[in-house]
């Protein structure tokens, strides 16, 4: 773990600075109150591969056209569909025209009522397999601008 203040050295202690607990190196830990010394703790194995898959549900882009076409094939007016799924008619009109994107809850109701597929599952890979030295975390030093004044 790198120092969360300067990002240069390896963190050797957890200190309290302005109410925040931060991992700091030997140069930075005197700037706060010592909470925990990391030297006392046995070394932890570093994780190199952190790939994970995250599955999310998204509404298809052509939702309005799909709803309209299926409703027309079934010969049902919007008012009937709105009453069956307990939503406002004007809301469904805006969804059908593509002005509003339905929530997942409404999309599921429409899928069930009309028998059309509006929700697709998307799998995203999260994380990386870079070596610990190649990936650097963002530290406070990345945001600090130091003004040096000449005397």
Image (spheres, rainbow, N blue to C red):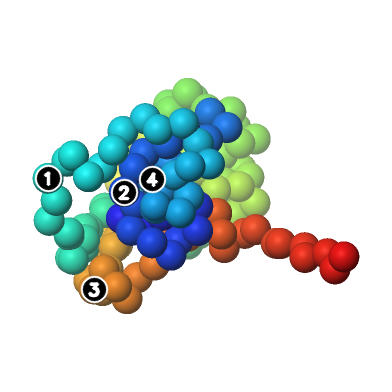
Residue receiving disc 2: 12
- Label 4 packing within 10 angstroms: few (<14), some (14-19), many (20+): many
Mark 1 vs mark 2, CA separation in Å: 12 Å
Q: Of circles 1 and 3, which is in front?
A: 1
Label 1: few (<14), some (14–19) or many (≥20) C-alpha neighbours in 10 Å = few
Tell me the tag on residue 23.
Answer: 4
Q: Earlier in the sequence, mark 3 or mark 4?
A: 4
Residue 131 vertical placement versus 139 (above, below): below
Mark 3 and mark 4: span between their CA atoms? 21 Å
Instruction: Please report the residue visible at 17 percent of the width from the left and 41 percent of the height from the top.
Output: 41
Secondary element type, mark 4 = strand
Q: Is residue 94 above or below residue 20?
A: below
Residue that carries the numbered disc 1 in the rendered image: 42
Q: Mark 1 to mark 4: distance in Å?
A: 16 Å
Q: Residue 126, position in %: x, y?
A: 29, 61
In the rendered image, residue 92, in percent from the top left (x then y), is placed at: 56, 39
Visible residue check, residue 122: no
Q: Quadrant of the N terminus?
A: bottom left
């Amino acid at each position: 773990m790198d120092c969360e203040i300067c990002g240069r050295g390896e963190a050797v202690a957890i200190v309290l600075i302005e109410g925040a607990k931060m991992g700091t190196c030997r140069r930075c830990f005197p700037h706060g109150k010592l909470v925990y010394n990391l030297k006392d703790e046995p070394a932890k194995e570093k994780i190199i591969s952190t790939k994970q898959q995250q599955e999310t549900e998204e509404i298809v882009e052509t939702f309005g056209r799909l709803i309209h076409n299926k409703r027309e094939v079934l010969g049902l007016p919007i008012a009937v569909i709105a009453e069956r799924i307990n939503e406002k008619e004007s809301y469904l009109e805006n969804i059908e025209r593509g002005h509003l994107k339905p929530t997942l809850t409404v999309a599921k109701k429409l899928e069930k009522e009309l028998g059309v597929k509006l929700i697709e599952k998307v799998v995203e890979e999260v994380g990386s397999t870079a070596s610990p030295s190649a990936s650097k975390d963002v530290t406070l030093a990345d945001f600090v601008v130091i003004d040096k004044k000449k005397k």
